Image (spheres, grey):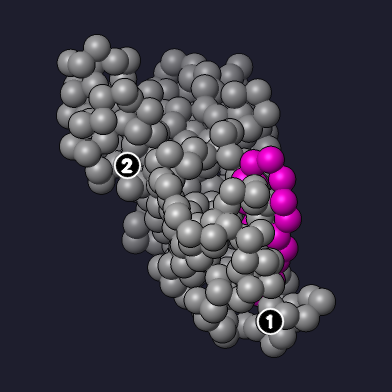
C-alpha cells in the first residue's frame, strides 16, 4: 500500500511522533505513561513479559499490508502470547525502524492500527512508550506486559489423559496468505474474510484468562498447529494425538477457497492450512479429562504417554511443517 505526503525525516522525528501518538488512549494500569525515561505500570502481583519482531520482506510485505494492518497485527501477536500464559495484557512498548522514504501518513496509520488492536483485543492496556530509528527496511518490535491473577499456565504441564483443546481459528490466516500471494488477484477479493484474518488476526485473548487455573498447559498457535503442538508435547514429555474428525470443521470452511485455487492451477490444501498454517494466533491448551472447558474451547485430541513420535494425527505420526522464523 502506497502512502503520500512528507516523510518522517522531512517533518522531523519529534513532530512525526507527536502526530502518531496522539491517537493512543490512557490505560487503566498505567501510572506513568509515554514521555518519561520509562513507564510505570501498576501490578498487584506477578506479571509476564513477551516480545516479538516483524521484519519487512521476511514477516510482512508492504504491497498488501497497510500501516494500520501491521499495527493491529503487532498487537495481536504479542497479546496472544500474554493470554497463552493465562495473563491479562496491561501495557505494550513499541520500537520501529523506518526508512528514509517512510511517510508520516504511514506512521499515523500504524499508530491507529496499534490502538485498534488494543481496543479490540486488550481493552484497558496502553502503548506506554517505545523508540523510532532509521534503517534500510521497516522493522517492528513490540514488548507486551501482562498481569497474572492465577499461576502461569506453562507449556510443560500436560499429562497423559488430558484432552487437547483449541480456542480460535485454524488455517484461515495461512489460506489468506496464499490468496494474497497468488498472481490471480481475484482470489483474494473473492475470499476477503480469510485475507482479513491474515492481515488482522483476532485471537481469543479473554479465553486465556478463563483457562488459567483449569488448563494444565497452554500456548499460542503462531507457527502452525503441527509445529506448536509438537513443541507443547516435547516441553511436557508426552505425545499428543490429534483427531482428524475434530479438525474437519476447520477444514470445511476453507474447502471452497482451496478448490478455487486448484481450479486456477495453483497448489492449495485446506488440510495443510489447518495442520501447518500459522498466524491465526489461537490458543492451544490441555485440560484434565472431565474438566469443564471455558466456552470457546473445542476438543481436538488427547494427550498420551510419551511415544515414538511427539505428535500423531489419529494413529499416524504427524511431522511438524509449520513456520520457522530462522530457517523457513
Residue 3: mark? none
Query: Residue placed farthest to the top in the image?
Result: 265
Residue 58: x, y in percent? 58, 33
Residue name at image x 56 percent, y 34 percent: 57
Q: CA distance from mark 2 to mark 1?
A: 34 Å
Q: Is residue 15 visible?
A: yes
Give the mark nearest the N terminus, 2 or 1: 1
Element type where label 2 sits in the image: helix
Residue 33: mark? 1
Residue 63: x, y in percent? 43, 39
Residue 100: x, y in percent? 65, 49
| Foreground pick, 179 / 233 | 179
Q: Which residue is mark 2?
A: 195
157 left or right, relative to 59: right
Residue name at image x 47 percent, y 67 percent: 112
Query: Residue placed farthest to the right in the image?
Result: 37
Residue name at image x 32 percent, y 42 percent: 195
Q: Quick one: label 1, few (<14), some, or many (20+) residues within 10 Å?
A: some
Residue 85, magenta (yes or no): no
Q: Is residue 181 above or below residue 139?
A: above
User: On the rendered image, what quadrant is the C terminus found in?
Assistant: top right
Q: Is residue 31 above or below residue 205?
A: below
Q: Which residues are magenta?
A: 127-147
| Foreground pick, 38 / 186 | 186
Residue name at image x 24 percent, y 12 percent: 265
Residue 260: x, y in percent? 18, 23
Q: Quadrant of residue 147?
A: bottom right
Residue 137, magenta (yes or no): yes
Magenta part, dominant SS: strand
150 left or right, relative to 208: right
Amino acid at each position: 500500500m502506497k502512502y503520500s505526503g512528507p516523510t518522517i525525516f522531512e517533518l522531523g522525528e519529534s513532530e512525526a511522533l507527536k502526530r502518531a501518538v496522539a491517537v493512543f488512549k490512557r490505560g487503566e494500569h498505567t501510572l506513568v505513561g509515554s514521555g518519561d525515561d520509562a513507564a510505570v505500570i501498576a501490578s498487584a502481583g506477578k506479571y509476564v513479559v513477551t516480545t516479538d519482531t516483524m521484519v519487512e520482506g521476511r514477516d510482512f510485505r508492504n504491497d498488501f499490508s497497510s500501516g494500520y494492518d501491521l499495527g493491529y497485527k503487532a498487537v495481536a501477536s504479542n497479546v496472544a502470547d500474554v493470554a497463552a500464559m493465562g495473563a491479562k495484557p496491561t501495557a505494550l512498548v513499541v520500537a520501529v525502524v523506518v526508512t528514509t522514504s517512510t511517510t508520516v501518513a504511514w506512521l499515523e496509520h500504524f499508530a491507529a492500527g496499534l490502538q485498534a488492536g488494543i481496543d479490540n483485543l486488550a481493552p484497558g492496556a496502553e502503548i506506554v512508550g517505545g523508540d523510532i530509528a532509521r534503517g534500510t527496511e521497516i522493522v517492528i518490535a513490540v514488548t507486551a506486559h501482562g498481569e497474572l491473577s492465577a499461576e502461569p499456565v506453562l507449556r510443560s504441564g500436560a499429562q497423559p489423559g488430558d484432552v487437547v483443546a483449541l480456542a480460535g481459528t485454524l488455517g484461515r490466516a495461512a489460506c489468506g496468505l496464499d490468496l494474497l500471494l497468488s498472481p490471480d488477484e481475484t482470489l483474494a477479493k473473492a475470499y476477503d474474510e480469510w485475507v482479513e484474518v491474515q492481515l488482522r488476526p483476532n485471537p481469543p485473548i479473554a479465553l486465556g484468562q478463563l483457562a488459567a487455573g483449569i488448563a494444565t498447559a497452554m500456548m499460542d498457535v503462531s507457527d502452525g498447529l503441527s509445529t506448536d503442538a509438537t513443541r507443547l508435547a516435547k516441553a511436557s514429555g508426552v505425545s499428543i494425538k490429534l483427531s482428524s474428525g475434530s479438525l474437519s470443521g476447520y477444514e470445511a470452511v476453507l474447502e471452497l477457497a482451496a478448490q478455487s485455487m486448484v481450479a486456477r492451477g495453483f497448489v492449495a490444501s485446506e488440510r495443510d492450512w489447518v495442520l501447518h498454517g500459522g498466524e491465526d494466533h489461537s490458543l492451544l491448551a490441555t485440560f484434565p479429562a472431565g474438566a469443564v472447558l471455558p466456552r470457546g474451547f473445542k476438543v481436538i485430541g488427547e494427550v498420551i504417554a510419551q511415544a515414538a513420535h511427539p505428535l500423531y494425527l489419529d494413529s499416524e505420526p504427524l511431522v511438524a511443517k509449520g513456520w520457522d522464523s530462522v530457517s523457513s
